[in-house]
Image (spheres, grey):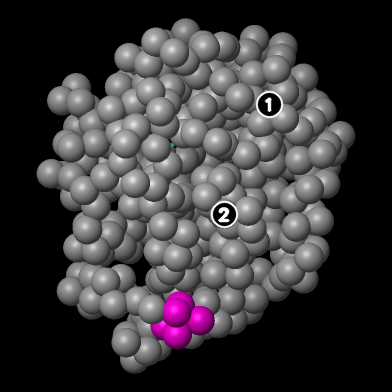
Amino acid sequence: MRELIDRLAREHTLTGREFAALIAGRDKDLDAYLFQRAVEVRQEIFGNRVYLRGLIEFTNYCKNDCYYCGIRRSNREAQRYRLTEEEILSCCREGYDLGFRTFVLQGGEDPYFTTERVCALVRAIKAQAPDCAVTLSIGERPGEDYQAMFDAGADRYLLRHETANDGHYRTLHPPSMSPENRKRCLRDLKNIGYQVGCGMMVGSPGQTPAHLAEDMLFIRALEPQMVGIGPFIPQHSTPFADRQAGALELTLFLLGLLRLMLPKALLPATTALGTIHPRGRELGILAGANVCMSNLSPTAVRAKYALYDNKICTGDESAQCRGCLEARLASIGYEAVVDRGDHPDFT
Ligand code: SAM
């Protein structure tokens, strides 16, 4: 197995069978070997710098009905909220004063936020903070809408593919959603020139090592600048309420593989990782990740963006979140940096 890891580090790819064998056969020794290689690669490119992003969860209205997600349309228990443009700009100003130079605007697929409104918002953020990068994560749209938002100044776009296997995709989503459209969106975003992020939930219901191997090959072919992966975590009022959460060890292992496959990628140690283990984000960094998200949303709405149960950081003020992350990173010898932190090919 170590030879496969060495070859991945050298050639940046493996066959599907080899990825599946690694994923199915991992153990503690192999984890340690992989993480050491992944950290070496990451250190060479990024040193001990970890990029902090300011995250604004600006709406939890969603027209989609993904079976795993707590803000799905059919969840009548979800307390819906939508920030005004002025509230979003105020979160950005607060973030700017805390030093953040990347704002990630994430939300459900909320029809209120038409492409015109999103473009106006991006222009307003860029007008008040021209030195900042804006990342959008607002789901599937037609290619021309992505183009308009890019023209308005958006720099990056996060759209997890969720799973590269079409059959598996259909077990996680209602028939109104299609894997073809999700993949079409990612191709459009790349062609337009965004720094693009895809990714999957680890341990989502029905997922096998072969599915994860397909994810690796899909990511290899797409060559995104960012890959967001985190464990699936059940949410009590969704159809997957009783399913098992994804495992910490497997998520860390995949982060390590991703670092070797795409050495220059921006890889977040996600909030979901921090939710399933008290030191999950630190362990993510020690497995090869190099990005953390700090929440800038108003505290009054934080708990309402409840994609899954027991989400961390729902009570802290923005400054506390930043301080907490900085201290966590310092505790493992890493430096939190808040500059734009573009992908090395985009600087
Ligand atoms: N609507 C946008 C989209 O579809 O990309 C962004 C918001 S969506 C809630 C962000 C991500 O949350 C999804 O891509 C999914 O991977 C993740 N997510 C949703 N429910 C989750 C759960 N129960 N456990 C872990 N991650 C979850």
Q: Which residues are magenta?
A: 28-32
Label 2 – label 1 distance at C-alpha: 23 Å
Can residue 82 be seen in this snapshot? yes
Vertical placement of residue 275 versus 347, above or below: above
Image quadrant where residue 106 sits: top right
Asked if the beta carbon under badge 2 is closer than 8 A to the nearest atom of ligand 1, the reply is no
167 lies above or below 181? below
In this rendering, would 24 be left or right of 292?
A: left
Q: Is residue 206 left or right of residue 258?
A: left
- Location of mark 1 (residue): 297
Seen at 45% across and 79% down, the residue is: 28
Where residue 219 is drawn, which disc sits there?
Answer: none
Position of the C terminus, as image quadrant, is: bottom right
SS for callout 2: loop
Which residue type carries mark 2?
His
Instruction: Give me the residue at 72% from left, 30% from top.
Output: 315
Residue 132, by quadrant, is top right
Q: Residue 174: where, in percent of width, then height?
A: 20, 26
Does the rendering let one see residue 66?
Answer: no
Of residues 182 and 25, the one nearer the viewer is 25
**Within the magenta stretch, is there residue 29?**
yes
Dominant SS in magenta: helix
Q: Secondary structure at mark 1?
A: loop
